[in-house]
Amino acid sequence: MPEHRKFEQVTAKAHANIALIKYWGKRDEELFLPMNSSLSITLDKFYTETSVQFCGKLKKDVFIFNNNIADEAETTKVSNYLNQIRKMAGVERYAMVQSVNHVPTAAGFASSASGYAALASAAVRAIGLDIDQKKLTQVARIGSGSACRSIYGGFVEWTKGNLEDGSDCYAKQLENEDYWDLSILAIQLSAEEKSLSSRAGMKLTVDTSPYYEIWVKEAQKDLGTLKDALHHKDFEQLGQVTESNALKMHATTLGANPPHWYWEAGTISVMNQVRKLRDSGIPAYFTMDAGPNVFVLCQKKDQEVVEQTLLTLKEVQKIYVCQPGPGVSYLAK
Ligand code: PMV
């Protein structure tokens, strides 16, 4: 690629996602190839906007995060990721990366999915790589696995693939964000940093949990059930399999050596309250990622009562009401 051409600044916006069928465990750590396929909903409320410009004058990558110069560890992560994109494009220039996160990260909501989806999308375009959406999901994946699902809006499947080079491992949209107006309530419980990253947690589980093998089989089955529920817009089936899949994922961590868990007392309180809501005839279902916060799924008509009921719990700090959101978009300067 000729280095004398003009490298424009590109800004991309990507939304976070919540997995209904979880990705938990890698078969290849370098290529971020998962052991099981997963399925998520992209969330309209949480997103990251990232601008990238490759510039001949820079002596190193510069990373500005939420309007502050990022620390060395964060900048190194971004640089290592950009190295892979530079290699693909045959370009050696360093980049100026500016990222603003509209995900309450400090509150324990993961932002790596929207972060790497936005970074991948902006960097690929800024460096002049001409790749399709499928390939873009693969490039986002090598930043953070779940980021590949954030390239698309709505309901997204990440197919695990079987090939060693990862070429058959990618994300695809099953239904767009207008397909089903579900509500996803993101329940903020804790402002503390999570104790074990998803990366470390899943590796420990793959390496040591006797339940891991069962997890992989169950996740495969659950995915089929969830796709069927999606196809028929069967909310109760979707909710039941979502909840049960999350519990199975978390069960693998209890069987790991050393055992670990992501839940806090408030996590259990929300789970209990969601069950009580169901007993009273309101279909609501919970799911948790690798952290204490809970996401509660319900139908839009029940959103208000679910929100008000959960707000009465003393551990609940805040509730963000989300709907299925869009895929990556590019912003004009
Ligand atoms: O891609 P990571 O490292 O953010 O891992 C995601 C793991 C879970 O959030 C627990 C599940 C998922 O599929 O998003």
Image (spheres, rainbow, N blue to C red):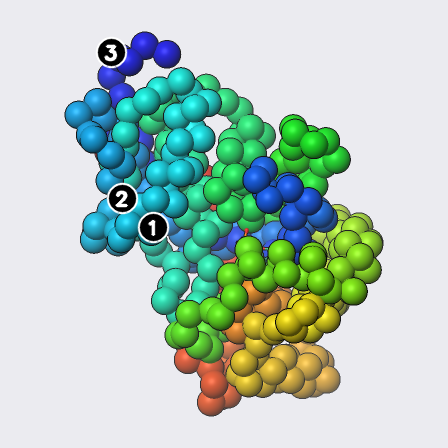
Q: Report which residue position mark 1 lands on.
A: 74
Amino acid at circle 2: Phe
> Which mark is drawn over residue 218?
none
Q: Residue at x 20, y 30 (%)?
A: 58
In the figure, 239 relative to 32: above or below?
Answer: below
Label 1 to label 2: alpha-carbon separation = 8 Å
Tag in front: 1 or 2: 1
Q: Residues within 10 Å of mark 2 (few under 14, many from 20)?
A: many
Amino acid at circle 3: His
Q: Report which residue position mark 3 lands on.
A: 4
Label 3 to label 2: alpha-carbon separation = 24 Å
Of pointers 3 and 1, the one earlier in the residue sequence: 3
Tag in front: 3 or 1: 1
Residue 112: x and y in percent read 45, 52
Q: Considering the numbered disc 1 on the image, is that residue within a helix, a strand or a loop?
A: helix
Amino acid at circle 1: Glu
Horizontal side, residue 39 vs residue 85: left or right: right
Q: Report which residue position mark 2 lands on.
A: 63
Quadrant of the image where one finds ligand 1: bottom right
Is the shortest distance between ligand 1 and the CB of mark 1 under 8 Å? no
Is the shortest distance between ligand 1 and the CB of mark 2 under 8 Å? no
In the figure, 284 relative to 68: above or below?
Answer: below
Q: Residue at x 23, y 26 (%)?
A: 55
Q: Residue at x 44, y 77 (%)?
A: 190
